[in-house]
C-alpha cells in the first residue's frame, strides 16, 4: 500500500518505543489517539501498521477521550487487535462482557474464506485473566464444545500454501500430504501440537491455540462431577471397575460439555506422551517434546484433581513415563510435575511413590543445582508442597543440606 510506506512504519515504531519504554504513564493528544484508532480500523491498512497502532493504543490507555467499538467490524484479525485495545480501556460500562460476547459470536459463526478465528483465542484467554465470570453457563458450555472439536478433531493432512498467482502458477491443486510425527513417520492418530507439517490448516492452528489455553480454561470452569466426598468413596472401589465404567462413559457423546472436554484433554495428553517417545529429527522438536511432557503431566494432574475417577486411568500412563525418563538427565524438568502427580494421587491409587521422591531429592540437588531454571522450579515445588513433604516424605527432611545448596544458588542467580 503506497499510503503506508516504510517511513510510516518507522515513525510508528519510534512512537511505540517512546510510550512503552518508561515506568511512567504517557499521554498522547486526543486527535492522535483518534487517528491511530481510525487507521487501525481501515480495511486498506497494512498488517504491520495495524499491529503498531494497536500496540501504541494499548500502552497509553485507559483514556476517557477515546471511544472504542468493534460492533461493525467483520475482519477477524482487525477485530482481535481492536478487542485488545478495548480490554486496555478497562471494564467501563461492562465492556469486557461485550468483548466476550463479540468473541464468542465470531467463534460460533462460519467465517468467509481467508478469515481466521485463531486470532480471537488470545483475546478470550485475556478475558479469563481479567474476569472469568464474564462468561455465563451457556457460553461456557458452547466454548467447551468448540474446544473439544479443535483439540480432538483437527485435520490430519497438511495445509495447502496460498498461491501468489502469476504466469507459472499451476491451476491444479496438489494432493495435500499427511501430517508427520517428529521422527518423520506419517501420523497414525489425531493431530496435536507435536504433529509436523510444512503448512497448517485453520483447524490445526486452532488445535495449537486451544492447547495453549486449555489449562487456564479448566481452572476457571471446573467441570461438574469434580472431586467430592462421594467421589472419594468411589475411589476406594477396584481400579479395574473404575476404568471400565469410565471407558464406557467416554464413548457417549451425551456427556455434559465440560466433562466431555476433560475426557478429550485426557486423550490429548496421552497422545502427547506417546509422541514424546519418538526420536525427533530436529533439536527444536526434541525441546518441544520435553515442554509438552511437562504440560501434559500438569494437565493430567489437574483433571485427576477435578475428577478422581481419572486417577486409575492416568496413573499407569504417568508411571510408565517415569520409568522411561527417570535415568535421563535431559528430562529432569519433567520429574517435577511427575513428582507432583504422585504427591497428589499416589495414596488414592495405592501406589508406592518412595522411588520417585528419592530420585527427585537426590538427582536435582546434587547434579542439576547449577541449572538456573531447574533450581528455581525445584525450590518453587518445595515451597508449594512443604507441608505435605514434611509430613509424608522422609527423604525431604533428610535432604535439607542439599536443598540449602539449591536455594543458595537460586538466590545468587537472582542477584
Image: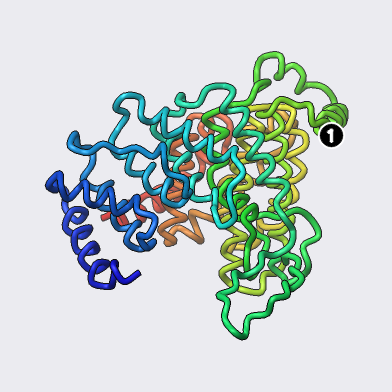
Residue 42 shown left or right of residue 67 in the figure: right
Residue 279 shown left or right of residue 93 in the figure: right
The answer to whether residue 323 is above or below residue 223 is: below
Q: Give percent across and percent down for residue 209.
A: 55, 50
Q: Nearer the viewer, residue 274 or 316?
A: 274
The answer to whether residue 150 is above or below residue 236 is: below
Q: Residue at x 83, y 30 (%)?
A: 252
Q: Give percent across and percent down for residue 275.
A: 72, 59
Residue 261 location, quadrant:
top right
The answer to whether residue 229 is above or below residue 165 is: above
Q: Nearer the viewer, residue 353 or 95?
A: 95
Residue found at the very far bottom of the displayed protein: 168
Residue 193 shown left or right of residue 22 in the figure: right
Residue 168 location, quadrant:
bottom right
Q: Quadrant of the C terminus?
A: bottom left
Q: Residue at x 58, y 76 (%)?
A: 165
Colouring style: rainbow
Dot 1, crowdedness within 10 Å: few (<14), some or many (≥20)? few
Q: Give percent across and percent down for residue 311.
A: 72, 33
Q: Nearer the viewer, residue 194 or 273?
A: 194
Q: Residue at x 43, y 53 (%)?
A: 375
Q: Quadrant of the N terminus?
A: bottom left
Residue 85 shown left or right of residue 150 in the figure: left
Q: Give percent across and percent down for residue 167.
A: 60, 84
Q: Residue at x 73, y 44 (%)?
A: 267
Residue 395 visible at all: no
Residue 117 visible at all: yes
The residue beneath circle 1 is: 251
Q: Nearer the viewer, residue 169 or 119?
A: 169
Which structural element holds mark 1? loop
Amino acid at each position: 500500500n503506497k499510503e503506508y510506506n516504510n517511513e510510516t512504519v518507522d515513525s510508528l515504531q519510534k512512537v511505540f518505543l517512546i510510550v512503552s519504554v518508561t515506568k511512567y504513564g504517557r499521554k498522547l493528544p486526543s486527535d492522535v489517539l483518534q487517528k491511530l484508532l481510525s487507521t487501525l480500523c481501515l480495511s486498506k491498512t497494512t498488517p504491520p501498521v495495524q499491529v503498531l497502532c494497536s500496540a501504541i493504543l494499548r500502552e497509553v490507555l485507559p483514556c476517557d477521550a477515546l471511544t472504542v467499538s468493534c460492533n461493525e467490524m467483520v475482519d477477524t484479525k482487525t477485530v482481535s487487535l481492536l478487542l485488545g485495545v478495548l480490554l486496555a480501556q478497562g471494564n467501563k460500562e461492562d465492556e469486557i462482557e461485550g468483548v466476550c460476547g463479540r468473541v464468542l459470536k465470531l467463534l460460533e459463526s462460519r467465517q468467509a474464506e481467508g478469515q481466521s478465528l485463531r486470532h480471537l483465542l488470545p483475546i478470550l484467554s485475556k478475558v479469563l485473566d481479567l474476569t472469568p465470570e464474564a462468561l455465563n453457563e451457556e457460553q461456557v458450555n458452547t466454548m467447551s464444545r468448540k474446544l473439544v472439536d479443535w483439540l480432538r478433531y483437527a485435520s490430519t493432512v497438511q495445509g495447502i500454501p496460498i498461491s501468489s498467482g502469476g504466469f507459472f502458477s499451476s491451476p491444479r491443486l496438489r494432493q495435500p500430504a499427511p501430517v508427520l510425527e517428529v521422527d518423520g513417520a506419517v501420523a497414525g492418530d489425531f493431530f496435536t501440537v507435536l504433529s509436523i507439517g510444512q503448512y497448517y490448516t485453520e483447524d490445526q492452528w486452532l488445535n495449537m491455540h486451544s492447547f495453549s489455553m486449555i489449562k487456564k480454561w479448566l481452572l476457571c470452569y471446573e467441570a461438574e462431577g469434580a472431586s467430592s466426598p462421594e467421589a472419594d468413596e468411589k475411589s476406594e472401589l477396584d481400579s479395574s471397575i473404575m476404568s471400565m465404567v469410565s471407558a464406557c462413559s467416554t464413548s457417549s457423546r451425551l456427556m455434559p460439555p465440560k466433562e466431555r472436554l476433560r475426557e478429550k484433554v485426557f486423550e490429548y495428553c496421552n497422545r502427547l506422551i506417546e509422541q514424546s517417545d519418538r526420536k525427533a529429527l530436529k533439536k527444536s522438536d526434541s525441546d518441544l517434546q520435553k515442554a509438552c511432557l511437562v504440560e501434559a503431566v500438569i494437565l493430567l494432574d489437574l483433571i485427576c484433581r477435578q475428577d478422581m475417577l481419572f486417577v486409575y486411568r492416568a496413573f499407569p500412563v504417568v508411571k510408565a513415563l517415569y520409568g522411561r525418563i527417570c535415568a535421563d538427565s535431559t528430562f529432569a524438568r519433567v520429574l517435577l510435575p511427575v513428582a507432583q502427580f504422585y504427591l497428589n494421587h499416589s495414596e488414592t491409587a495405592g501406589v508406592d511413590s518412595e522411588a520417585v521422591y528419592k530420585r527427585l531429592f537426590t538427582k536435582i540437588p546434587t547434579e542439576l543445582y547449577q541449572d538456573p531454571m531447574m533450581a528455581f522450579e525445584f525450590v518453587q515445588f518445595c515451597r508449594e508442597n512443604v507441608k505435605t513433604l514434611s509430613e509424608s516424605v522422609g527423604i525431604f527432611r533428610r535432604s535439607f543440606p542439599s536443598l540449602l545448596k539449591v536455594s543458595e544458588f537460586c538466590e545468587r542467580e537472582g542477584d
